[in-house]
Amino acid sequence: EREGIRVTAEEAEAAVRALAKDSGQAYDELRKTVWENGVITAMQERMLAEKALERLYGEARKVMADKVQLRPFSEVAGK
């Protein structure tokens, strides 16, 4: 949260809906199970980790784009 990365209730609900759709289970039944058994916490933690990785990857791409000068292989092959 310190980095401003969080999972909203809407995102968590959307993940449960997607899981229900993908698994062919009834949404209401699956939602109840997910919340009662604490699975939602693991789902939110995974979503949080994915968001953090996406941010890190995005920052890494920016740094690489700013710092690295790519040249055609033919220019460096003879060296």
Image (cartoon, rainbow, N blue to C red):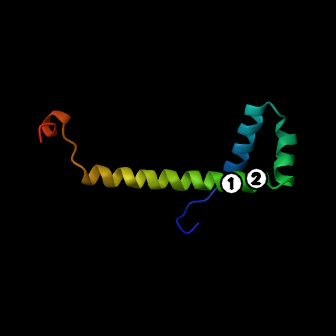
Question: Mark 2 packing: few (<14 Cα in 10 Å), some, or many (20+)?
Answer: some
Question: Mark 1 packing: few (<14 Cα in 10 Å), some, or many (20+)?
Answer: some
3D distance between C-alphas at marks 1 and 2? 6 Å
Quick check: marks 1 and 2 in contact, CB under 8 Å?
yes
Q: Residue at position x 74%, y 57% from top?
A: 41
Does any portion of residue 49 appear in the rendered image? yes
Does any portion of residue 8 appear in the rendered image? no
The amino acid at mark 1 is Gln
Q: Which of the image's four quarters has the N terminus?
A: bottom right
Across and down, in percent, residue 64 comes to: 31, 51
Q: Is residue 64 above or below residue 70?
A: below
Q: Residue at position x 77%, y 33% from top?
A: 23
Asked which secondary structure carries label 2, the reply is helix
Asked which secondary structure carries label 1, the reply is helix
Across and down, in percent, residue 66 comes to: 27, 53
Q: Is residue 28 above or below residue 64?
A: above
Q: Quadrant of residue 36?
A: bottom right
Across and down, in percent, residue 8 comes to: 66, 55
* Residue farthest to the bottom, as pictured: 2
Numbered label attached to residue 40: 2
Q: Residue at position x 85%, y 53% from top?
A: 37
Q: Which residue is mark 1?
A: 44
Q: Nearer the viewer, residue 68 or 27?
A: 68
> How many numbered marks, from 0 up?
2
